[in-house]
Each structure stands twice: as structure tokens, then as C-alpha cells.
Image (cartoon, rainbow, N blue to C red):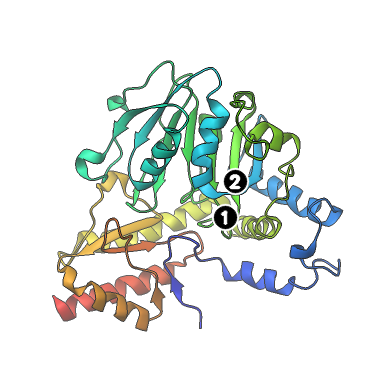
Amino acid sequence: MRVFNFSPGPAVLAEEVLQKAAAEMLDWHGSGMSVMEMSHRGKEFIAIADKTEADLRSLLAIPANYKVLFLQGGAIAENAIVPMNLLRGSSVADYVNTGEWSKKSIKEAKKYCNVHIAASAEDQNFTYVPARATWQLRQDAAYVHICTNETIGGVEYHWTPDTGDVPLVADMSSHILSRVIDVAKYGVIYGGAQKNMGPAGLTVVIVRDDLLDRALPITPSAFTWKEQAEQNSMLNTPPTYAIYIAGLVFEWIQAQGGLAALERVNIAKAKLLYDFLDQTSFYRSPVRSADRSRMNIPFKLQDESLDAAFLQGAGERGMVQLKGHRSVGGMRASIYNAMPLAGVQTLVDYMREFAERHG
């Protein structure tokens, strides 16, 4: 029996994607091979990679002057790869600190440059996004880095900051492809695939052409965006099967009506859960209303001694991976694209029942 999987990642995939992958496991399109067995330089896989990139470009309306890279290492690796690729000619980078993933980015960047914290939400335990007017940006910064959706804290940017001539770099790991965005407002967008794009093992980087000549000389070839772009992400063997699954996910998103249609569904799912949280005193949402994530919704029981019983009951009803991150505690419902509205409704019904029994 399939459960409602609220995992923050690796996360739920659409059943249609899994079914198609299963059907093609032993023989992809009459090739007599599984995608996992193909040469990454063979015509079969080249066709898969080309279509995957074309579909992603179409979904996000990526301008022609941006390169799309399919890499490895996750967002954690990109935390180092970003400064290595953008710091030539500068020793300063601006970072906005909105939570645990911002802190990881900052920690890594400090190995390569002088990190200036342009704004921080630490004063309120990372429960909001600092207003743009409060940011202290430096004109000599190589770039401005933000995490547009904090998977752990459940804080999301619902606006795009203007950083002038300084390139805006965004870790979008946990909400990319959940909504319409204007790629042209960013210099670099990156994210691990294991939330809304596919399985773990694939990292997608979208980088503007004019930023490809800024890598530090120490940058390894496999991590140099320009070299990877020149080799169509095949300087080394790419994560072939993960790229194939991402391609199936992109086809599934197209079949749902594209990002605008999915965004409407995601708004409805998030509203269903937040509306319930706001009308009960048994549970509470820690994030400021204007900055609440649609993808990752943390909440706490007023009586935290009931946490274990809540999780056990959820599991018995086919809902898994609801335990909050150890750094913040409580619960967290990650409701990515592939989580159906029925899953959120089942969770809300259970939360109401649990509150009635224990309130």
C-alpha cells in the first residue's frame, strides 16, 4: 500500500513517474537496455538528456543566455562551488541568513571569501524573511546569496529581491518547480533534485552566460561551470538515471498543466493546512504568515509530550515522515508537487481528531 509520504527529501514522486520508470526499466524505447546501462555519450542517453533540458527550459521559461547544468554533489557541494565560480576579482560576498540552510551556505563560503551578512532573521529564531529595506549590501560584493525556501524552518521568499548590478544567487532546492519564477532576475539558481525534480543524486544549476568567466584558478574542472557548460554537463559521467527520472518528472509537470497550474494546487494545499493551524490552539505554526512556505510546513503541539503519540497515530493511518528536524523539533509536513490534496486533507482530518481526543 502506498503511504502519504511527507518526507522533506528524498521526497514523494508521482506514481505515474514511478510506473513509467518501472515499465522502461529493462528496455528503454526498444533499445534493449536499461537507462542505467547506457553510455552517457551514446545516442540514446544524449536524446534523453537533450529532452530533459529542453523540457526544463520550457517549464521555467529559461532565457537563451542561461546555461542549464546537470551536476552532482547536491546543494551542499554548490555551497562551495558557487563562491569558487564567482569570486574572481572580488573577495567579498553578501549572504542573507534565514535559517539552517543559509547557515550551511555561509559556513562553506567562509572558506573562500569574506562573507558579509547583509541581513539575518536570527533575532526571531529564523521565523521570517528580513525586508529588503533592511539589507546592508556591499557594492564590491561578487554576488548576493539567498535560500529562497528554508526546508527545515519553513520560511519562503514570496518575492524576488532587487540587488541591482550585483548577481543574485539562489538556493531553490526545496521549492523550484513549485511555482512560476522569473529566471532573468537571478544570476544563478541551483538546487538538489530530491524535492520537486526527481531523485537524490542530481543537482541542477542555471547560470547566466556572463558569469561563466569568474571562476577562481583553484576550482576543479568538474566543478567549473564554464567547463561543464562547454561539455554539456558531460565533462565527467553525469548522474544518468537521475537525469532520466527528472525528465519523467518534467513530463508529468507538463501533463498537469505546467507551473501555473501546479502553483494553484500548491496554494490550495498549503492554505488547507495553514487555515486549520490558525483556527486551533492545540497546534501552532511558528512562521510569520507572510513568509510561510507552501512546501515545508512546520508545526508544534502545545503539549510536546504528545509528539510521540501523534507520530504513532499518523503512521497507523498511513502518513509517514512527519517528525520535525532535530534542530527545531515538533512536526513538519513537506507537501511537494507530488503530494496530492487528498494527502493534506487526510493529515488535517487526523490532526482534528487527535486534538479532540487529547485537547
Q: Reading the chain from its start, which is encountered first: label 1 or label 2?
A: 1
Mark 1 Cα shell of 10 Å, populated few (<14), some (14-19), many (≥20): many
- Residue 181 vs 333, above or below: the answer is above
The residue under the point 36% across, 63% down is 333
* Visible residue check, residue 157: no
Q: On the image, numbered disc 2 is attached to which residue? A: 204
Mark 2 Cα shell of 10 Å, populated few (<14), some (14-19), many (≥20): many
User: Do the CB atoms of the residues marked 1 and 2 lie less than 8 Å apart?
Assistant: yes
Q: On the image, numbered disc 1 is attached to which residue? A: 197
The residue under the point 23% across, 63% down is 300
Q: Quadrant of the C terminus?
A: bottom left
Callout 2, which amino acid?
Val
Callout 1, which amino acid?
Met
Question: In the structure shown, which secondary structural element does the residue marked by tag 1 occupy?
Answer: loop
Question: In the structure shown, which secondary structural element does the residue marked by tag 2 occupy?
Answer: strand
The residue under the point 26% across, 38% down is 121
- Please indicate whether residue 161 sits to the left or right of residue 312 in the image: right
* Visible residue check, residue 288: yes
Measured from the top left, where is residue 132 in percent x and y? 32, 28
Residue sitting nearer the eye, 116 or 205: 116
Measured from the top left, where is residue 112 in percent x and y? 47, 30
- Residue 56 vs 97, above or below: the answer is below
